[in-house]
Image: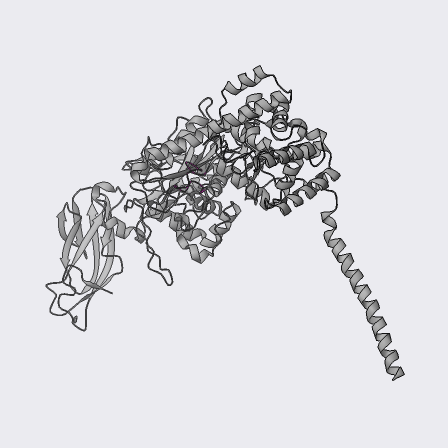
Amino acid sequence: MKLISRSLTQIKHKLHKTGKVILALLLICLIVRLSPYFAPIRAADIAQNQLAMQFSDRNGLQLGTLLTRDQEHTSVVPLNQVSPQFTHAILAAEDGSFYHHGALDMKAVIRASKEAIHAKKVVSGASTITMQLARMLDPVPRSFSGKMQEIWLSWRLTAGMNKDEIFAAYINRLPMGGNIYGVEAAARTYFSISASELNLAQASLLAAIPNNPTYFNPYQHWERLKQRQKYVLNRMVLEKYISGAIAARTHTEKVVFQSRQRGIIAAPHFLFWLANKMSETQTEENSPIRTTINLPLQQFVEAQVQQVIYSLAANNVHDAAALVIDNRSGEVLAYVGSPDYFNEVKLGRNDGVQALRQPGSTLKPFVYELALEKGLIRPNSILADVPAHYAIPGAKLYSPTDYTERFLGPVRVRIALANSLNVPAVRVLEKVGVETFLERLHQLGFEHLNQTPEHYGLGLTLGSGEVSLWELAHAYLTIARLGDATPLVSTFSKSPLSTPDSPLPNNHTIWQLITNILSDRHARATAFGVDSVLNLPFPSAAKTGTSSNFRDTWTVGFTTDYTVASWVGNFNGEPMRQVSGVTGAAPLWNRIMLHLHEHQEPADFPSPEGLVQLPICAISGLRPTPDCTSVVQEYFYPEDKSNYERENQFNLPPEYDEWLAKQQQSNFTSTNLRILSPHHGDLFLLYPGEDAKQKLELKLVGNKSAPVEWWLNGEKLDTQLANSLFWYLRPGNWTLEARSGKMSDKVSFQVELANLKPTRRGFSISNSPVKR
C-alpha cells in the first residue's frame, strides 16, 4: 500500500510540473499573439504600397491616374508637396489643435460630453485627426467597444510616429468622394492639377468633402458643398489662417470641377492596358509614368473615331479603334480602343486595339513576301484568278471566291495583291505551305495565332485566324521598316514591356517590292478605283481587310514616317450593312494620315534595289507584241531578263479552261486561239442507236470576232463568226483545228461505241456526250 501511495504522489508531482510548463507555454503564445496590439505603429508599418498610377504623355502632359488593385484611386505625396492652403483648411475643419494635443484632445472630449449631457444627444464630436486615421486604418463599429479600439490604436500611432508623419498619412487617405482617396488624387481628378497647386478656393472645397463625401458630392450636391466650404473658411478665420474679408471673397469665387472620368483625361484603354502589362511584368515605375502618347494627337484620333462611327450609324456600325506608330522608334503615339470608354451601355470598355478579330485580307502581303523570298513566285509571275477547289478531309470542298464572285483570269502578282484577290492568294499559300506561313506570322508577332496549321488551313491568308489591331500594326511597321522588326514602345522606361522581335531574313528588296505594290494606286484600281480614300496626296501604302459576314473592316498602312492601323465593326458581333474595308476603316485611316502629314509630307518610298523595270503585256506578263492592248511596266530580277527577251508565246494552262469558257469575247484578249472544248486527249462514248442525237460542242476563245474556220481530220466543217459549233459524234480518232487569220489551235480526241445503253434515256442527249 505504501508503494502504491508513493507512486501516486510522484505522478501528481509530475502532472503538477507538466501543468506549469503547459500554462507557461500558453502564456507565451498569448503574449506573442497579443504583442502586435501593444507595439507602437511606425510610419513604415502603414506605408501605402498599392497606389494608383499616374500617367503623362511624352511631353509631360497629364493623361490621368488609374485605380489601384483594390479599386481605390490614391496618390501619395509628401507633406511638403501639399499646398499650405489645404493643410490649413483641413486642420481648421477637422482638428484645429492637432499639433498641441496627444492621441486624444481632452478639452474636446470634455466639451463634447457637456454638450451631449445638456442636449441629451450627441451635438459635436471629439474625434482627433489621429483617431480619424485610426478609423481609416481599421474601421470598427460605432459602439463603445469600437471607440475603445479606435482610441487604443490612436495611442499606438502616437507612440510610433511624430505629428507630421501622422498628418501626412491622414491627408493621403482622406475620402474625397467615390473611390478617390487623398488630396493629390482629388486635386488631379477634380482640377487636373497637383496638390501643391491648390489655391484657397479649391483647397477649402476639397477640405469640405471628407466630412461626408456622399452628402457633399460636388456633382450632385453643389449647394451643400458650398455651405460646408463656408464653414471651413470660417474655421480658418477663427484659427487665424486668413482674414474674414478673404474668407468672404473666396466663398464667392467661381471654381469649376472638371467632368469626372475616373481620373482619366485621355487614352483610357491604353492606360488600363499599360497598367495591366506593368503588373504582369512586375515593373515598378516612378509616378507619374511618362508614356509615348502624344496627347494632342490622341485627342484628335479619339474625336475622329467618334465622327466616323457617327457617319456610319445608318449602316449598323457602332465601334471603332485606331493605333498610330512612329516608324523610326516604334513608339505608340495614339491608342483608341473604342468611341467612348465610359459608355458601358455600348460596351465602351471593350478594347478594339487588343481584341481578337478575324483580319480579313490584311495578312496577304506577308504570304506574298514569303513566297517571293523563297523563290516560289517572281515579281513578274502570272497567277491564276480562276475557280479553284480544294478537298479538305472531314469538311466541305473549299472553293475560295472574292466578294464580287468574279474572276480576272491571268493576273500579275502586283494586281493580285493590290486588288486583294482571294484565289491567287490561296494558290500562293498552297505553294508556301500553311505551316511555313504560320511560322513566319509568329516571327512577325502574331502570338494569338496559336492553333495548328490544320486548324487554319488555306483560309489563313484570307483571315481564318484571329489577331489584334496591335499585332497588325506591329507587323505592318515591319514592312515600313523594310523587314527590320522592332518592338512597339509604350513608355520611356528603362524596363521595356516588350520582348525583342525575332530576327527576319535580310530581304530589303522584297519588302521594298511589297511596299511598292501596296502604294500603287493604279494597280489597285480594279477593286478600289484610282481615286479611293486609300489614295493620299503623298506617298503611302495601304491594305484593307473585311472579315466574313462583314463583322470587321480593317485598314492598315504606312508612310516613311508613320504606321496607322484602324478597325471599324461591332463588339457584339453584329454584321454591318454595305460596309467594307474601304468604306468602313479606310476613311478613319485617311483622316489620321492627312492630319499626321498636315505640315510636312513624307519622303518617297525607295525603289526596289537591284530590280529592273521592263514593259510587259498586262495579260501575258511577257514582252509586248503588236496585238497587245495594254502595256505596263513591271519589276524583274536581273536573271529573268533573258527569259523576258526570249519568250513571247502566251499559252494558258488547262486550269484556265473553266474560266475561259465563261468569258465574253470582249473581256479577254489573247495572243492566240484557244479550243476549250473538246480537251486534247478526251474520249467520248457513243451509244448504239443514238448516233443521230449525240453531239459535241466545239468551243474556243481568242478570235476577236474574226471569221473562224473549223477543220476536222483535214476536212473543212464550217466558217463562221461564232465561237462555237455543234458536231454530231461519229466513232473514230479525230483531230480538230480552228483557224482565224494567222492564229490557230489544234486538239485530238476519240469517239468509241459503248457496249451498253444508258439505264436512263436522255442521259447524254442534252448536248453533253458521255466523256470517259
Q: Give the residue drawn at x 24%, y 47%.
A: 673
Q: Give the residue drawn at x 57%, y 33%.
A: 185
Q: Tell me where the magenta segment starts and ends, as one range.
A: 337-350
Q: Position of residue 527 (x, y in %)?
A: 32, 38
Q: Identify the residue at the far bottom of this view.
A: 1
Q: Tell me if residue 712 comes above or below residue 157 in the rendering.
A: below
Q: Identify the residue at the far front of this view.
A: 118
Give the quarter of the figure containing the N terminus.
bottom right
Q: Give the residue drawn at x 21%, y 50%.
A: 700
Pick the front one: 679 or 558: 558
Give the quarter of the figure containing the C terminus.
bottom left
Q: Is residue 561 left or right of residue 750?
A: right
Q: Position of residue 62 (x, y in %)?
A: 55, 29
Pick the front one: 425 or 133: 133
Q: Is residue 682 left or right of residue 213?
A: left
Q: Tell me if residue 482 comes above or below residue 708 in the rendering.
A: above
Look at the magenta stretch and give its main secondary structure: loop
**Coloring scheme used:** one colour
Pick the front one: 487 or 252: 252
Q: Identify the residue at the far top of this view.
A: 245
Residue 630 appears in the figure: yes
Answer with the quarter of the image where residue 120 lies. Answer: top right
Tell whether position 240 is magenta.
no
Tell whether position 349 is magenta.
yes
Q: Position of residue 90 (x, y in %)?
A: 61, 28
